[in-house]
Image: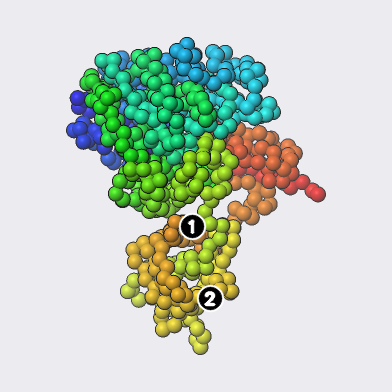
């Protein structure tokens, strides 16, 4: 067995691999960039080595720095995790050449399927069904544009290397083609160091199903069942489950057999996933991920197998622990990816310090987390914070258990998607398996949170803010000017709070009698009696009218976070400074809502633009975001150039409104 292991990765997957390695008595080594100097994965490893700047190209994608870290730490093996160098054949070979075990398939197998272009060609030869398109070696953008027109629309453009849906572009009209090819190439080069692209016929509404395969160095192959990963945004999976539901048994058997054909065709070793698109009748080979998948956890839940342990044992030369006949699948498991993003605003990534991140603790629920309270979410990597996985004897129970676990996940400081995912899991469309990969593209708004806050919620938020302010004084003497008891001579004691939430402003007046909250009035219209208010660590409770309400709460600066029932509310205590950016936009200033890097500047100083015209493209957390003109006008000062790093809430450029 391997004695020491370096994980050439970060975040959730590094922490997950370390957990199994520790159980097996293996010494663990982490690597980190400048952005991850205090990251959780560096704290849970036995040793951690710095490998360079925040930019992935100069740290997690730098093979030389990774191998030097292995040499300095004396690591016997390297596990690549997923993403970064995990499907890089040159890295696998470099590890072997340096005398370090690569925990994954041999370089030849990665080369055979690590490129989607090569994979598609070989699978055609092996008789595995594939989608029509272009998988040639001529990669000039002009040639690709001609090939795309010949293949016909709609089509999907994919980076030939890597995975995770990064860089994929869907083209429905010829006018979109050139820009989509350019964007796909930039993202492919940025994320994987390889700008080669693949073109495929686009199926608008298939399901995404896949098969987990495993092989050892003795020539033994097994599959560990199938999964469904159809709930996606921007081609990246959010909810995955095993086994794939509502799949005809003859299709299931055909998928599993085809996956083993693919693995045998290339002499595969270690963990791999063969992915297919299912259009309701036929399955088409999409790609093989020559690495451990993010969603491997649901397979572990239904098989009772630790796939990382299997990888480590096979890398040590041991045979597969189980034969195909010994593999048993029991029950149903579903995983949700909790990400730092705002699903109700175009899945805009979020970055910053996690004032609170509390994961659920429930029976038959597993959490694989890469972040905890106090950690900082960088703006330069994937937005995944962690995964919550629920197992149950049946699918409906697993979905209910996972939804409950997500509503017991509490995060403050960055925007997250866990409650939005819980609403999907409770929806009839998901439970009845009427969803496909287009679900969120077409129907994301169906799963939005509440558009209006109940009066009780806003009064509860005011009580939380007021009682927290009182508690902050403690028992120390205070002056009358510091008191927040609303005392006014000869009048009822009142304390007022103004909140901004969901684009609206609300005023809550709290009325006190004999030092106790007695009533709350919302927007001078709705008045509720208040009694029995209690504030404990992280919880506010009160009787409002005839009903007792309680909620988790947290105050961070001018933000009041409230978790009430299945919903989360982030209310902003009214502060004139919060209006600065809105005022700037109204007069022609344009700001970025999160840190990022300028990918392109589409305009020049003095240029006249129409409303909606693209001004800049910002890349943040591996995704591109278009900054468009809010109105017709003339471009003034441009504050950032291509390649510049943009801090959060920075003014990007000035736009003088055209005269009517």
Q: Which residue is pictured at 68% across the width and 52% down the height?
A: 587
Q: Quadrant of residue 87?
A: top left
Q: Which residue is pictured at 48% across the width and 35% down the height?
A: 230
Q: List the residue tagged with mark 1.
A: 570
| Secondary structure at numbered mark 1 | strand
| Secondary structure at numbered mark 2 | strand
The colour mode here is rainbow
In the image, 378 versus 178, the foreground residue is: 178
Q: Work out whether residue 415 can be spotted.
A: no
Asked whether the residues under the numbered discs 2 and 1 touch, taking CB atoms below 8 Å apart as contact, a structural biologist would say: no
Residue 152 position, x and y percent, is 65, 22
Q: List the residue tagged with mark 2.
A: 527
* Residue found at the far bottom of this picture: 490
Residue 475 position, x and y percent, is 32, 74
Q: Which residue is pictured at 54% across the width and 21% down the height?
A: 131
Image vertical order of residue 569 relative to residue 122, above or below: below
Apparent side of residue 166 relative to residue 171 in the rendered image (left or right): left
């Amino acid at each position: 067995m391997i004695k020491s292991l370096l994980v050439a990765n970060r975040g959730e997957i590094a922490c997950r691999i370390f957990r199994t390695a520790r159980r097996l008595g293996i010494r663990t080594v982490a690597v980190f960039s400048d952005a991850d100097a205090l990251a959780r994965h560096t704290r849970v490893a036995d040793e951690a080595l710095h490998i360079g700047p925040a930019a992935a190209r100069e740290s997690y994608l730098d093979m030389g720095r990774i191998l030097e870290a292995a040499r300095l730490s004396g690591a016997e093996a390297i596990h690549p995790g997923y993403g970064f160098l995990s499907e890089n054949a040159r890295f696998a070979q470099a590890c072997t050449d340096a005398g370090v075990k690569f925990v994954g398939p041999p370089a030849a197998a990665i080369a055979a399927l690590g490129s989607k272009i090569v994979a598609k060609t070989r699978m055609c030869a092996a008789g595995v069904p594939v989608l029509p398109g272009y998988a040639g070696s001529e990669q000039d953008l002009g040639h690709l544009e001609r090939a795309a027109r010949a293949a016909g629309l709609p089509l999907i453009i994919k980076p030939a290397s890597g995975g995770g849906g990064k860089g994929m572009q869907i083209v429905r009209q010829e006018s979109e083609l050139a820009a989509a090819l350019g964007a796909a190439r930039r993202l492919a080069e940025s994320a994987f160091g390889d700008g080669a692209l693949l073109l495929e016929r686009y199926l608008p509404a298939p399901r995404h199903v896949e098969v987990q395969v495993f092989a050892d160095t003795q020539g033994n192959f097994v599959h560990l069942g199938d999964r469904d990963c159809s709930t996606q945004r921007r081609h990246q999976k959010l909810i995955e489950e095993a086994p794939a539901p509502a799949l005809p048994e003859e299709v299931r058997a055909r998928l599993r057999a085809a996956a083993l054909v693919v693995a045998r065709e290339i002499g595969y070793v270690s963990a791999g996933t063969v992915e297919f698109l299912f259009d309701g009748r036929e399955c088409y080979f999409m790609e093989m991920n020559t690495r451990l998948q993010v969603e491997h956890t649901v397979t572990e839940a239904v098989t009772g197998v630790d796939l990382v342990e299997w990888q480590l044992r096979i890398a040590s030369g041991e045979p597969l622990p189980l034969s195909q006949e010994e593999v048993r699948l029991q029950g149903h498991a579903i995983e949700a990816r909790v990400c730092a993003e705002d699903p109700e605003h175009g899945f805009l990534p979020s970055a910053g310090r996690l004032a609170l991140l509390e994961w659920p603790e429930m029976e038959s629920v597993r959490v694989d987390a890469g972040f905890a309270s106090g950690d900082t979410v960088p703006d330069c990597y994937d937005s995944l914070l962690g995964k919550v996985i629920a197992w149950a004897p049946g699918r409906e129970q697993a979905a209910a258990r996972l939804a409950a676990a997500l509503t017991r996940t509490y995060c403050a400081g960055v925007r997250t998607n866990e409650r939005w995912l819980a609403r999907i899991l409770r929806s009839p469309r998901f439970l009845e398996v009427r969803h496909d990969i287009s679900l969120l593209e077409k129907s994301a708004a169906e799963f939005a949170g509440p558009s209006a806050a109940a009066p009780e919620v806003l009064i509860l938020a005011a009580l939380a803010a007021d009682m927290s302010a009182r508690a902050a004084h403690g028992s120390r003497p205070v002056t009358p000017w510091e008191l927040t008891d609303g005392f006014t001579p000869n009048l009822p004691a009142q304390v007022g709070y103004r909140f901004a939430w969901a684009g609206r402003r609300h005023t809550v007046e709290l009325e006190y009698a004999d030092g106790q909250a007695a009533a709350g009035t919302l927007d001078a219209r709705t008045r509720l009696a208040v009694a029995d208010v209690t504030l404990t660590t992280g919880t506010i409770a009160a009787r409002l009218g005839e009903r007792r309400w309680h909620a988790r709460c947290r105050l961070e600066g001018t933000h009041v976070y409230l978790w009430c029932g299945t919903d989360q509310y982030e209310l902003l205590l009214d502060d004139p400074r919060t209006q600065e950016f809105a005022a700037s936009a109204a007069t022609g200033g344009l700001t970025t809502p999160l840190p990022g890097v300028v990918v392109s500047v589409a305009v020049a100083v003095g240029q006249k633009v129409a409303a909606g015209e693209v001004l800049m493209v910002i890349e943040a957390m591996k995704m591109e975001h278009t900054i468009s003109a809010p109105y017709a006008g003339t471009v003034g000062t441009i504050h950032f150039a291509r390649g510049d790093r943009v801090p959060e809430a920075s003014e990007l450029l000035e736009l003088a409104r055209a005269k009517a």
